[in-house]
Amino acid sequence: MKTEITKKTTWSAEDRALIQKTVARGTTESEFKLFLYTATKYELDPLIKQVWCVKYGNAPAAIFTGRDGFLHIAHRTGQFNGMETVPNFNEKGELVSATCKVWRKDMDNPFVVTVYRQEYDTHKSNWAKMPITMLQKVAESQALRRAFDISGLYAPEEYNPAETSQSKVIDITTEEPEQKPAPKPKKSTTNYKFLQEMQKLKKQNEEVYYSVLSDAGFKHANEITDRQQQLMVYKTIKADIETIAASTEPEEVPVEPAAKNEVSDEEVAAKLQEVFGGEVERGEK
């Protein structure tokens, strides 16, 4: 279900300098190359802020597009056939989750994604003002990403910088700050639980496993040290594997129950006599 919309695009030296100064501030050379590759692959224009890149402290740069960016990618495929998003509430009227359905013209069934508020709500900024809208954007972004095979791109509503270490965000709207020597990264503690879970996913579908890692800029899972990025990569691999499994799962064929084998009293008595010897008293029917 690979969606190919790639178009060769070249960036002039002037464009590259402007992009790195405005929407990819603070990125390393390899991070900036990955950013331009992602923008080119999905035909998103960083100069009009359809895609941007943010550095959270010493963590690897995160590449973002808005919900409308995912819609832009979906429309360009020519296969987008509609989307429906519904917020879900508990008996107290509190927002609990949001469910999004995305239809493709070349498939009979929609892609369905449900996201839960407790996993994304920061209780700050727009989450405090309009949580329904924010949660719907998360659901729509994930459903579109799954339906149109999009990797390496995330919606800012999905990302919680508070969960990352040294989560100071570089503001892409301000003037370029004075350059200071980058501090030496702290030695991170290996997340063995994450590596164990990733090994399980690798055994399920090795092709998807390495494809998502590659799109995220890694060769192996142990290279991912940022906890938030570990979570995003894990969720993406798991969702892609589940999608493939759901599309290839055979229909269940009802099995007729085996006919009951009636055994007469005489046959039972004969068998008991054979096993235990002697006469066996037969009960009345």
Image (tube, rainbow, N blue to C red):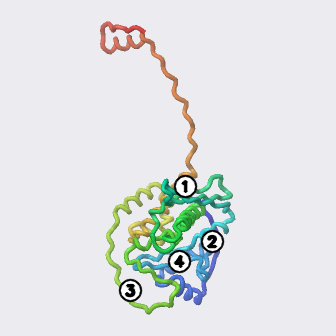
Q: Could you tell me which secondary element the residue under label 1 belongs to?
A: helix
Give the label, 2 or 4, closer to the camera.
4
Q: Tell me the mark number nearer the camera, choosing from 3 and 2.
A: 3
- The Cα–Cα distance between marks 3 and 2, rounded to whole angstroms, is 35 Å
> Which image quarter: residue 219?
bottom left
Query: Along the line of sight, which residue is nearer the eye, 207 or 41?
Result: 41
Quadrant of the snapshot with the N terminus: bottom right
**Is residue 80 among the parts visible in the rendering?**
yes
| Mark 4 lies on residue | 35
Amino acid at the residue labelled 3: Ala
Q: Is residue 273 above or below residue 123?
A: above
Callout 3 touching callout 2 (CB < 8 Å): no
Q: Is residue 207 visible?
A: no
Cα separation, mark 1 vs mark 4, equals: 27 Å
Name the quadrant containing residue 50. bottom right
Q: Which residue is mark 3?
A: 182
Q: Circle 1 sits on which residue?
A: 244
Where residue 18 appears, as percent x and y from the top left, is: 56, 88
Q: Residues within 10 Å of mark 2 (few under 14, many from 20)?
A: few
**Element class at badge 4:** helix
Tag 1–tag 4 contact (CB < 8 Å): no
Element carrying mark 3: loop
Of label 2 and label 4, which has the lower sequence position? Answer: 2
Q: Amino acid at mark 2?
A: Thr
For badge 4, the amino acid type reads: Phe
As drawn, 274 above or below 151: above
Marks 2 and 1 sit apart, C-alpha to C-alpha, by 22 Å
- Which residue carries the number 2 mark? 6
Question: Is 227 placed left or right of 94 in the picture?
Answer: left
